[in-house]
Amino acid sequence: MKTDHASEVAQGRRFEFGKNWARFLRELDETRIVAAIDSLREMLEVENLNGRGFLDIGCGSGLFSLAARRLGATVVSFDFDPASVECTQELKRRYFPHDARWSIAEGSALDSSFLNRLGQFDIVYSWGVLHHTGAMWQALENAALACKPGSLLFIAIYNDQGGTSLRWAAIKRLYNRSPRSVKFLLVLAVGVYFKLKTFIAIAARFENPFATRPQSTRGMAWFRDLVDWVGGHPFEVARPEQVFDFYRARGFSLMRLKTDRGHGCNEFVFRRDTSNH
């Protein structure tokens, strides 16, 4: 896996998510951890995850693996990016050293044999990951392999904006094929674009555009999310109904849905039917 990942990065076909998340860990504090925990509670509609197995597909920074472990789950985390695996191992060292109920591995969401070896779980979580695999629909198929009957599948997939999504895909390809100076300018330009867009929208509602706004409800950092967005390649998108139809055909029922009208992610919580074996 390490060779495949390094080769894709060297060819400008893959963003180094793990290096970006390693920088985020320098900013991680208890407030962000609590926000991540609260977001899991809200979407999964639970107070805790005691006695449940939790699989984090594409664990990234490791924040949500940590959140699930804090909630009492037995956690298995994996990522294709070796640096993301290191980030998650670092969080385990900080908060749950020598804990037998949190294991971390390097692996791919596209590797069905790897997923089958992990077994099945009560909660399968993959937020903003499967659209970065290079084969999103196969990754969505494989995620179902890890779901035991009656389990919950919590995923987030980029919203399909048609031509706008195609333009973002071109920006992401350019970023990954560019020298560091051009990458910096692209992030700067996109950051200014988003800030101006937000400023105008707030002002149009006759609100104070200079007022302090709440941080991400998921505990993530705005700038790290921005770099992730600009550089995040491979990049695929889907309409909410496409994801719904895909999983309904595989024996899943939609429990919760949170849609995004813009370029962000649509969030889904599905339950696998108990009759599905």
Image (cartoon, rainbow, N blue to C red):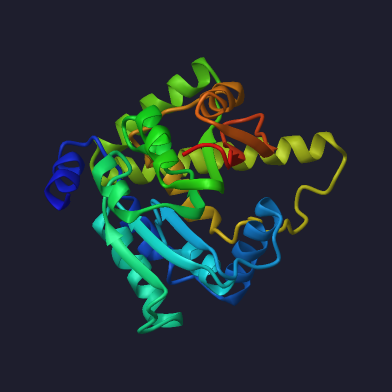
Q: Is residue 263 above or below residue 222?
A: above
Residue shown at the point (37%, 80%) measured from the top left: 93
- Residue 126 visible within the image: yes
Q: Is residue 10 left or right of residue 171?
A: left
Q: Position of residue 250 (x, y in %)?
A: 50, 29
Q: Is residue 55 above or below residue 265?
A: below
- Residue 186 visible within the image: no
Q: Which of 163 and 234 lies nearest the eye of the viewer? A: 234
Q: Position of residue 248 (x, y in %)?
A: 57, 27
Residue shown at the point (63%, 55%) measured from the top left: 216
- Taking the view exactly as shown, the residue that stands out farthest to the right is 206
Q: Is residue 161 left or right of residue 88?
A: right
Q: Position of residue 29 (x, y in %)?
A: 55, 75
Q: Is residue 259 above or below residue 42?
A: above
Q: Is residue 192 left or right of residue 235?
A: right
Q: Which of 276 and 270 lies nearest the eye of the viewer? A: 276
Q: Is residue 207 above or below residue 224?
A: above
Q: Which of 110 and 114 lies nearest the eye of the viewer? A: 114
Q: Position of residue 234 (x, y in %)?
A: 33, 34
